[in-house]
Image (cartoon, grey):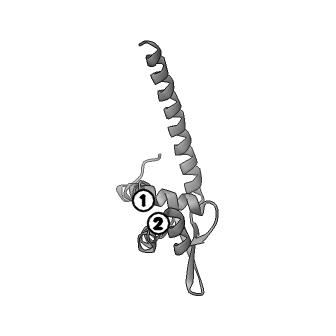
Amino acid sequence: MKQMPPEALEQVAAYFQVLAEPTRLRILNLLSEGELNVGELAQACGYTAANTSRHLSLMTKHGLVARETRGTAVYYSLGDESVHALCDLVCGNIARRLERDAGARAAFAKLR
């Protein structure tokens, strides 16, 4: 990361803060498969439409999600494709760490 002014670092932190909520990650995961409206997302996640809408509003504000109005429905899609790559990178790192930890636990279990 290059030297960034404090204002830019605040924006980066806010972006990651949006990603730090499991509900929003679940919504982003669903949107990675294609666009959906609020009702479809709410049903797929098991949340209320109001709660889903609140999360979508925040993600739209930060550019993670794009919205398109069609008649009376609003459809959402990924607004930033790099978010998918970022999540894949983080998930891969966590999977490797879990595998290492499981291997270490197995090695210690053999010592008993």
Residue under the image location 56 percent in, 71 percent down: 40
Circle 1: residue type? Val
Residue under the image location 52 percent in, 68 percent down: 43
Task: Determine whether the residue tagged by mark 2 lies in a helix, strand or loop.
Answer: helix
Could you tell me how many numbered marks the image carries? 2
In the rendered view, tell whether residue 100 sits above or below residue 62: above
Residue 37 at x, y percent in the picture? 56, 74
Crowd class of label 2 (few under 14; some 14 to 19; many from 20; radius 10 Å):
many
Tags 1 and 2 touching, CB below 8 Å: yes
Residue 38 at x, y percent in the picture? 52, 73
Circle 2: residue type? Met
Q: Nearer the viewer, residue 22 or 19?
A: 22
**Within the image, what quadrant is residue 32 found in?**
bottom right
Residue extending furthest top? 111
Work out how far the residue at label 1 is from the one at label 2, CA to CA, in angstroms.
7 Å
Q: Is residue 81 left or right of residue 20?
A: right
Q: Is residue 70 left or right of residue 46?
A: right
The residue carrying mark 1 is 18
Q: Is residue 28 left or right of residue 57?
A: right
The residue carrying mark 2 is 59
Q: Which mark is residue 35?
A: none
Q: Nearer the viewer, residue 6 or 68?
A: 68
Crowd class of label 1 (few under 14; some 14 to 19; many from 20; radius 10 Å):
some
Residue extending furthest bottom? 71
In the rendered view, tell whether residue 79 sits above or below residue 102: below
Q: Nearer the viewer, residue 8 or 39?
A: 39
Residue 35 at x, y percent in the picture? 62, 69
The quadrant of the picture occupied by the C terminus is top left
Going from N to C along the chain, the mark reached first, 1 or 2, is: 1
Residue 78 at x, y percent in the picture? 58, 64
Task: Determine whether the residue tagged by mark 1 lies in a helix, strand or loop.
Answer: helix
